[in-house]
Image (spheres, rainbow, N blue to C red):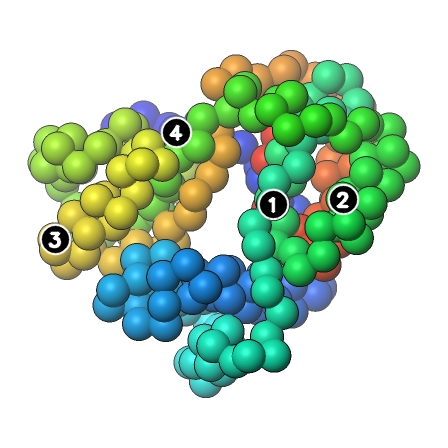
Amino acid sequence: MGRIFEVRKSTMFARYDRMAKQFSRVGKEIAIAVKKGGSDPNTNPALRRVMQNAKSFNMPKDRIESAIKNALGKDTSNFDEVIYEGYAPHGVAVLVVTATDNTTRTVANVRSHFNKGGGALGNSGSVAFMFNQLGVFKLKPEGLNIEELELELIDYGLEEVGEDSEGNVIVRCAFADFGAMQKALEEKGITPISSEIEWIPANTVPVTDEQSEEVFKLIERVEQDDDVQHVFHNMG
């Protein structure tokens, strides 16, 4: 099993306010999941995934339940997932995943972040074709026979298996196979550390250390926005 290619999609978790940002992000993801598939995690794989991720960084159970209850309320903000595309300095493509109840506000803010960071917001489809949308499951390596697991998961859409920089097992599948892969892991009694939908670049843009600092400054500026959930890029 080889080291899997990783893309730094977020810097926010290293900041002092990372927990508040995480909880806010999960609350919006719960609202979107409930809106699409209902409040029962047993019949809503998307909600089950979000709840599982919330537990992975110790979001209290009562806060998770409160977020689900709020998502069912009539007065709850109607969040939708909207993806913005653009370029950071030095030709680095950037995808910004947002959860917003006001697209006019969000697009104005995201455009401002790009402009101030030396980049430019593009049109829909301007950079998305450079990425593959994949389901990414992070698993604890203990008790897993990777070769056997790989053979067993091929029928459920497995595209790649490897390990990350921390030694965790990473399983990737096509976006369309996310539900099947999630169910397969559950049936095998495997509880992922986390499971996400990520945009993985088909190719990366090489940059110097100095250039990467400029790119990360733009990414950090974008991540600070309350409407932003994830940021992906193709910087090598």
Q: Are marks 2 and 1 in contact (CB under 8 Å)?
A: yes
Q: Residues within 10 Å of mark 1 (few under 14, many from 20)?
A: some
Front tag of 4 and 1: 1
Q: Is residue 209 visible?
A: no
Q: Assign a secondary structure to mark 2.
A: helix
Front tag of 3 and 4: 3
Q: Nearer the viewer, residue 122 or 210?
A: 122
Q: Nearer the viewer, residue 139 or 91?
A: 91
Q: Assign a secondary structure to mark 4.
A: loop
**210 relative position to 11: left or right:** right
Q: Assign a secondary structure to mark 3.
A: loop
Image quarter for residue 210? top right
Q: Name the residue rendered at 41%, 59% in the picture.
A: 36
| Residue 222 image point, x, y percent | 75, 45
Mark seen at residue 188: 3
Distance of label 4 from label 2 (alpha carbons): 33 Å
Image quarter for residue 35? bottom left
| Residue 159 image point, x, y percent | 27, 27
> Looking at the image, is 138 positioned above or below residue 51?
above
| Residue to which mark 1 is pinned | 82
| View extreme (right): residue | 116
Residue type beneath disc 4: Ile
Residue type beneath disc 1: Val
Mark seen at residue 4: 4
Q: Residues within 10 Å of mark 4 (few under 14, many from 20)?
A: some
Q: Are marks 3 and 2 in contact (CB under 8 Å)?
A: no
| Residue to which mark 2 is pinned | 107
Quarter of the image containing the C terminus?
Answer: top right
Mark seen at residue 179: none
Q: Are marks 3 and 4 in contact (CB under 8 Å)?
A: no
Give the mark, 3 or 2, whose residue is nearer the N terminus.
2
